[in-house]
Image (cartoon, grey):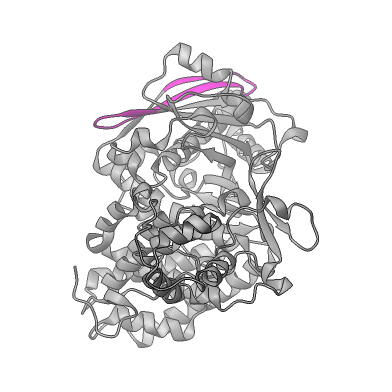
Amino acid sequence: MAQMVTGLDGDGGLRSPDTVMRLARMGSAHPSRLSFMRTLLRRLKAEGWTVARTVFDIDNKGVGRAVYEAKGPRHTYSLVAFAHDLPDELRSDRVIATAWDTTFTLFDGVPTEADVDRLAANVPLQEAGRISDDELTLSRANRSVRLWQHVVERLAAGEQPDSEQIEAVGYLMRTTAVYGSGKFGAADRVKLLDRPLMSAPFHIEMLTVWLIRTFTLDLVEHMARIKGGPDAVAIEPALRRRIGVGNSTGLGMAPFLVTHPALLNAWIEAKETALARVRALPEACMEARAVFADLLARAAANVRDWRSEHPIQVMKLARLRNDLSALEAYLEGHPLGGKYPWDRLYRWAEDVLSLEGQEQLVSLMLEPHGALIDDLAAGMKVDEYESFRINGAQEIGAFRADLSKRYGWALNVDYAKEAHCARFWYVSEEKLEPRLGERHAEDGAEYEQPLAIGRDIRALADALEDYEAGALLADFLLAHPEHRHVVRRVQIAAGRPYSEIRDNLIDAEMLPIDMLRCKLAFFGANRFDPRSDRWVRICMFQNAPFPHELADAPDDEWAYPPLERV
C-alpha cells in the first residue's frame, strides 16, 4: 500500500463518513474502476471466457428463442432468451406490466431442449411463472420503439443508423427488472458463494445484462435481414459498441442500501481506500497523467451527450459541465507535478467544484491506477451473517458510547416535526415491492417498514436512558424487543464506518433517487436520467466490448466514450 499523506481526512487517509454518507453526495456518484460491470469484464477477459450462440430460432416476426453459452475455466452459464410479438399498447416500463418484448433467464450450465421448453412455459410469464434453482436470474426488457424501427429500416436498406439518434437514446432494449438471489424460485445466492466469478457482488446480474446486449444486437440485425434480404447490412463495429442496455429502476431498489449495511460498508470502504491510495502517491508518473488527461476529455464528451429533462438533473449536469471546464483550466495552470499532486488536486476540487464534479473527479483519479487499487474489488463481498448476531453481553454504557459516536446525525433531528417524519416506507400488496407513502396525507402508515433508521435510533437512545451503564444489552432487549433491529445496526456500525446513510430517510425533502444512483453507480451504470424523484433511467455496458471482442479489447478502454465518433 502506498505511503499515506499526513493530513488526509479520517483514519488511514479515508474521507469521513460524515462527508461520504450523505444522500446529496451519494446521489452524485459516478461509476469507477471498482464498479461491478468493470470488475466482471476484467475477470472474464483475464480468465479467457468465451461466449457461443448455440440456439437462435427466431422467426420473421421476431418471435422465438435463443441460447448464449458463456464458458469459463470451471463453469458455464447460459442466457436463455425469448422474443415476443408485443402490441404497442401493452409495452410499459412499470413493474405492474404483464407482457414484454423479450424475457430472459440465466441458466446454471448448459440447458437441454427439455430445459428450454420448460423455461418457455414460465420465463415469459415472469412473476406469474416459476423457475428452479437451475436458474440464476429472471429478467425482461422492452424495445426503445422509435430507435429500434430506425435501426431496422436503415440496416435493411443497406445503410448505417444515424449516430446522433443512437447517442440520444443509447440503447435498443431497456430492462425493467433483473431478479436474482432466490426470487420466484431462482437459485439462492448461497449456491454460488464458492464460485469466484459469481460470488462477487451482482456479477450474476451484470453477466445477464451483458449477454442481453449481445442478443439485442443480434435480434435487430436479424430483423433487418428479414426486411431487407440481401441488401441488409450489419451495424459497423464502432457504432455497435455505442449501443448499451437501458434500464428503468424505481423504489424497489432503494431500500437495499439500508437493509444491507455491512455490504454497503464494504463497497464504500473499498472506493474510499482506493481514493486514499491515489491521494497518497508522492508523484504522478507521465503515463498516469496522460491517461487522466485523455479520460477527462472523454468524460467531458460524455456529459455533453448526457441528456435529462428532470429539473434536478438538468441543474446538476450544467454544474458538471462547468466543473469539468474548470478542472481543465486548472490543470493548464497547475499540471500534476510536485509532491502529492493527486491529493492537491482533490483538495482544490473540494473547495471549487460541485458534488457532481467532485465525485466525477474521484472516479477519474482512480482510472490510471489499476495496479494500485484493483485488488480492492475482492473485498467488496461480505458474509452478512457474520455481523447479524447481536452481542447481548455488551454493557449498556459501552453501547451508548458507540451510539453517540456514530449517530449524532440521527440524534439531532426533531422527529416530532411533520417535515421530519413526512414519509413512510411500505411494501405494496399487488407486487410486493417497496413503496413510499406520505404519512400526513395517505393511509397505510400502520404497515411501515423499519427503514426510518434515524427516528428509530432516537427512540432507542431514549429507551436506554433508564438503564445503568453496567447493565447488559441482553436484559434491555428482553424488555424492549422492538429495538432489536436498530441495536443490531449500531453494533454493525461500530466496526464499519460506512454502513449507514447519514440522513433522515423519512424527511419531506429526502430524494429516493439519490439512493438509486449510488447503487447504480456501483453497478457501473451511466447516463442517469431521473423521471421523478422516485425512478430513474440509466444505460449499462455502453461502449463495452461484445463477447467476440473481449479477448483483444484494451483493458477497460470502454469505460468512457471515444473522442472520435462514427
Main SS of the magenta part reads: strand
Name the residue: 48% across, 58% down: 477
Front-lying residue, 202 or 402: 402
Residue 448 on image: x %, y %: 66, 53
Name the residue: 66% across, 51% down: 426
Left or right of 428 on screen, residue 331: left
Q: Is residue 44 magenta?
A: no
Front-lying residue, 249 or 330: 249
Q: Quadrant of residue 176?
A: top right
Give the position of the N terminus as an image quadrant: bottom left
Q: Quadrant of residue 76?
A: top left
Magenta residues, start to end: 54-77
- Rendered view: 321 above or below 394: below
Left or right of 282 on screen, residue 107: right
Residue 26 visible to the viewer: yes
Residue 89 on image: x %, y %: 78, 34
Residue 50 on image: x %, y %: 31, 32
- Rendered view: 213 above or below 487: above
Residue 125 on image: x %, y %: 63, 25
Name the residue: 74% across, 33% down: 90
Residue 257 visible to the viewer: no
Name the residue: 79% across, 53% down: 443
- Rendered view: 30 above or below 361: above
Instruction: Farthest residue to the right: give it.
Output: 441
Front-lying residue, 190 or 228: 190
Instruction: Farthest residue to the top: give it.
Output: 114
Q: Is residue 74 magenta?
A: yes
